[in-house]
Amino acid sequence: MAVYARLARGGRIVFRTGDHPPPHFHAEFGGDVAVFAIRTGELLRGRLAPQDERVVRDWYDGAPEAAVDRLFEVWYDFSSP
């Protein structure tokens, strides 16, 4: 597991080694975890408190296109066997 970004409210964006498609990132806040699609930012699995989900969405929506491209690169690096 690698921490990619630290967010407000103690959150963090992480990638896990050997992860499965589709390309995604994990958002963790304390014991709560949610999985978001890299391509769209859509919530795929899990649940966060509404204010924590807003932090993730603001982080994702504010990212320039190059940063989203970098998320794909990191995901592929970690998902490769």
Image (tube, helix red, strand yellow):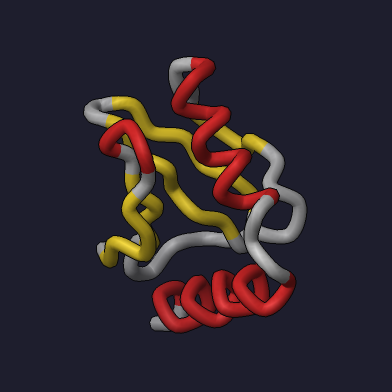
Percent of width and height locating residue 11: 33, 40
* Horizontal relation, residue 27 to residue 17: left or right: right
User: Residue at the location (51% across, 60% down)?
Assistant: 20
How many marks overall?
0
* Horizontal relation, residue 8 to residue 76: left or right: left
Query: Would you identify the image quadrant in which residue 57 lies?
Result: top right
Percent of width and height locating residue 71: 55, 70
Pick the residue in front: 79 or 7. Answer: 7
Pick the residue in front: 59 or 4. Answer: 59
Quadrant in which the C terminus is drawn: bottom left
Quadrant in which the N terminus is drawn: bottom left
Percent of width and height locating residue 39: 73, 59
* Horizontal relation, residue 24 to residue 62: left or right: left
* Horizontal relation, residue 25 to residue 60: left or right: left
Pick the residue in front: 54 or 1. Answer: 54
Q: With respect to residue 33, does 14 lie above or below? A: below
Query: Would you identify the image quadrant in which residue 64 lies?
Result: bottom right
Percent of width and height locating residue 18: 38, 69
User: Residue at the location (32% across, 32% down)?
Assistant: 9
Q: With respect to residue 67, does 7 lie above or below? A: above
Q: With respect to residue 38, does 75 lie above or below? A: below
Pick the residue in front: 64 or 16. Answer: 64
Query: Would you identify the image quadrant in which residue 72 lies?
Result: bottom right
User: Residue at the location (42% across, 43% down)?
Assistant: 27
User: Residue at the location (64% across, 61% down)?
Assistant: 63
